Image (spheres, coloured by chain):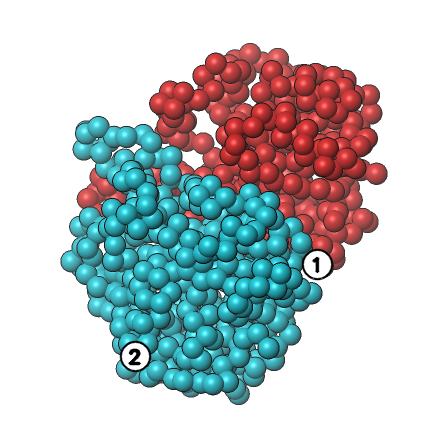
Chain colours: A cyan, B red
């Protein structure tokens, strides 16, 4: 890469914590945030555990000093994480050289559901609920709140949305179009997605166990996460502490099926290889992979086989932190980017929880006990989505 | 950074080159401008086509048209802009969840409801494993796709990218948009274009030998929530970027009728055409304007009428669009 991209801020709201430090505490304590449904009003409430953020919309408004209005939960989660990532420092930037790139799968679906539920029940429905339906609304709202004027865009590539938003933002900085960006993504829990994944019969009725021989599906989660990223020059001129750098990334398409992944993981292999190429790293230099690892039979097999091939002979440590957060869909790439940054910062690999039995098709198993590792240099984070949208990003310690 | 256009595909309500369309009052007075859809069997295997929703068919067919036009089998990457995405299937699945009280709705509408299913189905049809992305960013959805392609091509000029957009309009969505206008008092006294929908894809690369229509020499998006007058936004942008404005022959403008004369003045009285007369108002209408510009660069200005100013030759066209008085985009297409 011609220009280095530094991560100088992180922000996260997910089932495992309402901030980066809370999330880190849950990871360190190996405590999952997945539990019974508290806030979403769904008939599936008692059937499936979920990774809900442990705050009501009112709590979120209070924390954000917003009036209690009909905000989509998507916006509230995103604003909380974006504010934490950008912090106070954003005021020191030229707003026209600052961008936001966010990713989302269903945008403000929580309010759309409320609207159509009211129409169906024949009670007064407020049409303004639908103004927050599209994926782009929360990005615009956050840009307004944070005063970002240089660039604004929203990616929607299903479960790899926010990985691709981090990639797009990195390209914008490399190209010199902007100096710094708030990059990440958000999705809030909705009946739409919960029933969608249930109709595909890939929800686990117990806590998910990614990469386990007896895995039985995913737990749906929600959350938002953002990175504050900037050019090397911008980071040094603002005298920001650098958490890690984005060393490389790859994006490819499995081009196999709209929802299923090719068994041999064509897309995942291409994404991981192209990330390694762009980072100018040899596979042996990757110390840890933060898996996509949803816990579905299909994903974990394809991803596992793809890793065995790309890293043949020297398979790095790997684990899926979706066992703490649930699968946060469009936010997953950014949630795991923040966790990767925390891993680099603390020199620690956070293990899969609920892991018991190695998959029979694989020669290795995920890390299942917390692991301190002083020489943790390069972490690959995988994000694979419906539609075969596969992306891998490599986060590295700054030498 | 230049992106050369070697192929295009377009599905839209009508063509400015078609006099019947220009003069058909019934079409012009309708609430929605629906596109003239092609025979999908010419582009998509009928066995596959049966399972695809209308928006995916529009996207896939226009993508195939662009590839055929450019004589390219498989591009190096596919980028789609869609602001609202697959709204018909979204409505369908949401309805079945609500009306069926969450009793195991059928997954098929859910599967094809995600915004990226358009880019994905194009990739599956072409067996294209390259870069693949989808932007759903209100009035910048198509422009983001262009910007993404431009950055990738700038890094590796030999790459060929398929970039485009598609948005569909359902009756329910048109009702909702109309209710918005009433509820939020939007545009009520303005000369309003019908709601539109459509698809357009372009085959882009960084090599001049591939230029068959023209080149995209600049893409700029300005998000401005300050209620600043559009004419000031345009003037400020081009004052800061005089070389981009210089020698402009024609402006394809996505603003309002009462803004065309002042816009023409900013560009030394050159011709201005309100392109939304032909395609309607939708989030990704800039892709229609780009198709329109390519046709003008290739075929000239014969039979073209202007909404303000006048142009006699055409080799540099500026596309200016605005959406919701916040999203402004500026694209330059030229053929020198």
Q: Residue at position x 60%, y 15% from top?
A: B258
Residue that mark 2 sits on: A355
Camera-side residue of A257 and A105: A105
Q: Is residue A374 visible?
A: yes
Quarter of the image where the N terminus of chain A is located: bottom right
| Up/down of B226 relative to B185, above or below | below
Q: Position of residue B16 (x, y in %)?
A: 66, 22
Q: Position of residue B215 (x, y in %)?
A: 75, 42
Report whether B278 appears left or right of A370. Answer: right
Q: In which image quadrant can residue B59 be found?
A: top right
| Up/down of A367 relative to A136, above or below | below
The chain that hosts pointer 2 is A
Quarter of the image where the C terminus of chain A is located: bottom right
Q: In which image quadrant can residue B317 be found?
A: top right
Toward the left, the furthest residue is A46
User: How many residues crowd around disc 1 within 10 Å: few (fewer than 14), some, or many (20 or more)?
Assistant: some
Badge count:
2
Mark 2 to mark 1 CA distance (whole Å) = 42 Å
Are the residues at dot 2 and dot 1 in contact (C-beta closer than 8 Å)?
no
Q: Residue at position x 45%, y 62% from top?
A: A10
The chain that hosts pointer 1 is B
């Amino acid at each position: 890469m011609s220009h280095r991209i530094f991560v100088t801020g992180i922000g996260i709201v997910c089932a495992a914590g309402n901030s980066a430090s809370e999330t880190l505490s849950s990871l360190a304590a190996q405590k999952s945030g997945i539990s019974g449904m508290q806030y979403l009003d769904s008939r599936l409430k008692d059937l499936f555990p979920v990774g809900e953020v442990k705050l009501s919309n009112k709590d979120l408004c209070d924390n954000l000093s917003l009036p209690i209005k009909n905000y989509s939960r998507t916006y509230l989660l995103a604003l909380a994480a974006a504010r934490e990532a950008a912090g106070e420092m954003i005021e020191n930037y030229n707003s026209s050289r600052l961008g936001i790139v966010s990713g989302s799968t269903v945008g403000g679906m929580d309010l759309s559901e409320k609207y159509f539920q009211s129409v169906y029940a024949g009670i007064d429905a407020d049409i303004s609920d639908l103004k927050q339906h599209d994926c782009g609304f929360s990005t615009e709202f956050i840009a307004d709140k944070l005063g970002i004027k240089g660039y604004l865009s929203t990616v929607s590539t299903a479960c790899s949305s926010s990985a691709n938003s981090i990639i797009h933002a990195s390209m914008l900085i490399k190209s010199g179009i902007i100096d710094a960006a708030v990059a990440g993504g958000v999705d809030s829990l909705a009946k739409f997605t919960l029933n969608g994944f249930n109709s595909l019969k890939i929800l686990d009725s117990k806590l998910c166990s990614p990469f386990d021989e007896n895995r039985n599906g995913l737990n749906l989660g929600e959350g938002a996460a953002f990175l504050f990223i900037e050019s090397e020059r911008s980071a040094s001129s603002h005298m920001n502490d650098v958490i890690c750098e984005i060393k490389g990334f790859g994006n490819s398409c499995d081009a196999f099926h709209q929802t299923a992944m090719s068994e041999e993981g064509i897309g995942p292999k291409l994404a991981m290889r192209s990330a390694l190429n762009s980072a100018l790293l040899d596979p042996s230099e990757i110390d840890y992979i933060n898996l996509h690892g949803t816990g579905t039979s299909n994903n974990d097999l394809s991803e596992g086989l793809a890793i065995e091939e790309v890293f043949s002979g020297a398979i790095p440590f790997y684990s899926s932190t979706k066992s703490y957060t649930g699968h946060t869909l469009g936010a997953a790439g950014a949630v795991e980017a923040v966790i990767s940054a925390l891993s680099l910062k603390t020199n620690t690999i956070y293990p899969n929880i609920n892991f018991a039995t190695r998959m029979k098709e694989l020669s290795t198993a995920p890390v299942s006990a917390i692991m301190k590792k002083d020489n943790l240099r390069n972490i690959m984070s995988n994000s694979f989505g419906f539609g075969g949208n596969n992306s891998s990003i490599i986060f590295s310690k700054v030498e | 950074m230049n992106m050369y256009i070697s192929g295009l595909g377009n599905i839209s309500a009508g063509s400015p080159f078609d006099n019947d369309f220009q003069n058909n009052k019934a079409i012009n007075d309708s609430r929605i401008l629906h596109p003239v859809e092609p025979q999908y069997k010419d582009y998509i295997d009928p066995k596959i086509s049966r399972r695809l929703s209308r928006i995916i068919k529009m996207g896939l067919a226009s993508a195939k048209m662009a590839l055929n036009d450019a004589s390219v089998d498989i591009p190096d990457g596919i980028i789609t802009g869609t602001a609202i995405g697959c709204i018909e299937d979204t409505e369908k699945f949401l309805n079945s969840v609500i009306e069926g009280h969450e009793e195991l709705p059928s997954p098929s509408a859910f599967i094809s409801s995600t915004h990226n299913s358009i880019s994905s189905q194009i990739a599956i049809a072409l067996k294209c494993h390259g870069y693949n992305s989808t932007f759903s960013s209100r009035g910048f959805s198509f422009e983001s796709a262009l910007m993404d392609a431009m950055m990738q091509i700038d890094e590796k000029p030999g790459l060929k990218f398929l970039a485009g957009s598609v948005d569909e309009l359902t009756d329910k969505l048109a009702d909702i948009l109309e209710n918005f206008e009433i509820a939020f008092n939007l545009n009520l006294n303005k000369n309003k274009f019908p709601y539109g929908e459509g698809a357009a894809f372009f085959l882009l690369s960084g090599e001049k030998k591939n230029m068959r229509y023209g080149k995209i020499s600049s893409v700029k998006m300005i998000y401005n929530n300050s209620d600043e007058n559009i004419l000031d936004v345009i003037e400020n942008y081009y004052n800061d970027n005089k070389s981009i404005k210089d020698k402009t022959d024609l402006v394809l403008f996505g603003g309002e009728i009462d803004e065309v004369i002042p816009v023409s003045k900013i560009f030394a009285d050159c011709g201005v055409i309100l392109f939304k007369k032909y395609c309607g108002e939708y989030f990704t209408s800039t892709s229609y304007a780009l198709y329109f510009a390519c046709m003008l660069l290739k075929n000239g200005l014969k039979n073209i009428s202007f909404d303000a100013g006048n142009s006699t030759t055409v080799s540099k066209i500026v596309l200016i669009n605005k959406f919701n008085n916040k999203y402004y985009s500026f694209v330059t297409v030229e053929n020198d």
